[in-house]
Image: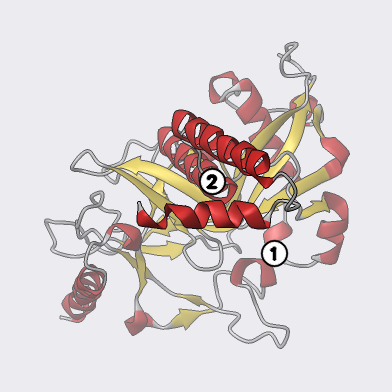
């Protein structure tokens, strides 16, 4: 076109002004060659390629995350690791650490050998004593993502965070008429473990990673009539840590978690200090010791909006405040019905 002469003038400025015709011809040839290569290889700037690779990596990770039941991060060594015995010494006197090691060892043996291998009277010291934790270290994770299928056969993902969204639900192994167990997540761990006790194999004697969740158990208030037939939400309370027959804390296999749960405090009944003593690990207490009590009761939101019956996780409440306020109204009605 008419502006083509500008290219020649730009090339001329790059010559040494001596026999410049040949130099301009060479530069024009290089420009044409580069243009053909660019067209053939679909040339894209390096910055664009980096962004594309990043998007592909994220999409691949999300696709993989939805295909597995849970994801707590797969780095070989999480940065927030601690030595178990030093940690227990730092929290000496906290009621949550009672039988921590015993419960942890029993859980790890059960995970490695399988629950079917557990004797009727439980695993013996010969079993639990042969669990080895690499360097006696546990590694914390801030969150764990649980993938689940909703009632309308869609895949959803709940993020469980011990500080903000800590309540979870599991299938009940009991044969009663209530199908779920509920727990409050205190922490999310993994450890590198091996087992060389009774029933061990070559595989169990090798180091491998085990993910587990430390929880505080809820129990259903059986004195409170609830459910569809009574038009009331199910009511829970924390297990009484002072009752010697209770095991208020424990460990859970992330694969056993169905999804997160939406529990509503029963504000009408206030708080209580009778179920557990002061505990920074269970309640995230401040240094001044404030708020060392629990809500006396909780209601299970069983209102279904894109979620699972008797779950009502806030992450599945499409429309946000609508689902939350509906559950709150039902909880208030339950309180009023109880008073009536």
Q: To which residue does mark 1 refer?
A: 95
Query: Where does residue 232 sit, x and y in percent of width and height?
Result: 19, 65
> Is 329 located above or below residue 317 in the figure?
below
Please identify, in this view, whether the residue under mark 1 or under mark 2 is nearer the observer: 2
**Quarter of the picture holding the C terminus:** bottom left
In this view, the residue in front, 262 or 232, is 262
In this view, the residue in front, 334 or 242, is 334
Query: Where does residue 141 sit, x and y in percent of width and height?
Result: 64, 53
> Is 201 located above or below residue 289 in the figure?
above
> Is 193 located above or below residue 280 in the figure?
above
Q: Which residue is drawn at 49% across and 44% down?
A: 52
Q: To which residue does mark 2 refer?
A: 54
Query: Where does residue 149 sit, x and y in percent of width and height?
Result: 30, 40
Q: Which residue is drawn at 79% across and 24% down?
A: 126
Task: Measure the C-alpha gap from mark 1 to mark 2.
Answer: 46 Å
Q: Quadrant of residue 2?
A: bottom left
In this view, the residue in front, 66 or 269, is 66
Q: Earlier in the sequence, mark 1 or mark 2?
A: 2
């Amino acid at each position: 076109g008419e502006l083509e002469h500008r290219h020649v003038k730009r090339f001329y400025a790059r010559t040494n002004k001596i026999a410049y015709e040949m130099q301009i011809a060479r530069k024009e040839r290089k420009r044409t060659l580069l243009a053909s290569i660019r067209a053939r290889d679909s040339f894209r700037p390096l910055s664009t390629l980096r962004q594309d690779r990043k998007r592909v990596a994220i999409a691949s990770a999300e696709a993989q995350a939805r295909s597995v039941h849970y994801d707590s991060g797969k780095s070989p060594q999480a940065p927030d690791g601690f030595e178990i015995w030093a940690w227990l010494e730092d929290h000496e006197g906290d009621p949550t650490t009672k039988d921590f090691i015993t419960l942890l060892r029993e859980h790890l043996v059960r995970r490695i050998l399988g629950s079917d291998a557990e004797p009727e009277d439980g695993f013996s010291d010969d079993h639990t004593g042969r669990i080895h934790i690499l360097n006696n270290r546990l590694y914390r994770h801030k969150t764990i993502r649980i993938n689940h299928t909703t009632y309308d056969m869609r895949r959803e993902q709940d993020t469980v965070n011990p500080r903000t969204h800590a309540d979870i639900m599991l299938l009940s192994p009991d044969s009663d008429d209530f199908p779920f167990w509920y727990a409050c997540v205190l922490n999310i761990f993994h450890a590198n473990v091996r087992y060389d006790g009774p029933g061990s194999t070559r595989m169990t004697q090798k180091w491998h990673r085990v993910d587990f969740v430390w929880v505080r158990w809820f129990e259903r208030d059986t004195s409170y009539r609830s459910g569809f037939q009574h038009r009331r939400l199910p009511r829970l309370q924390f297990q009484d840590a002072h009752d010697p027959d209770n095991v208020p804390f424990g460990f859970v296999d992330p694969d056993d978690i169905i999804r997160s749960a939406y529990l509503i405090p029963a504000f009408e009944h206030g708080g209580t200090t009778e179920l557990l003593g002061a505990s920074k690990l269970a309640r995230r207490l401040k240094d001044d010791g404030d708020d060392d009590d629990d809500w006396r009761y909780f209601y299970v939101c069983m209102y279904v909006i894109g979620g699972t019956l008797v779950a009502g996780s806030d992450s599945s409440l499409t429309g946000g405040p609508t689902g939350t306020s509906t559950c709150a109204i039902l909880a208030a009605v339950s309180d009023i019905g109880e008073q009536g």
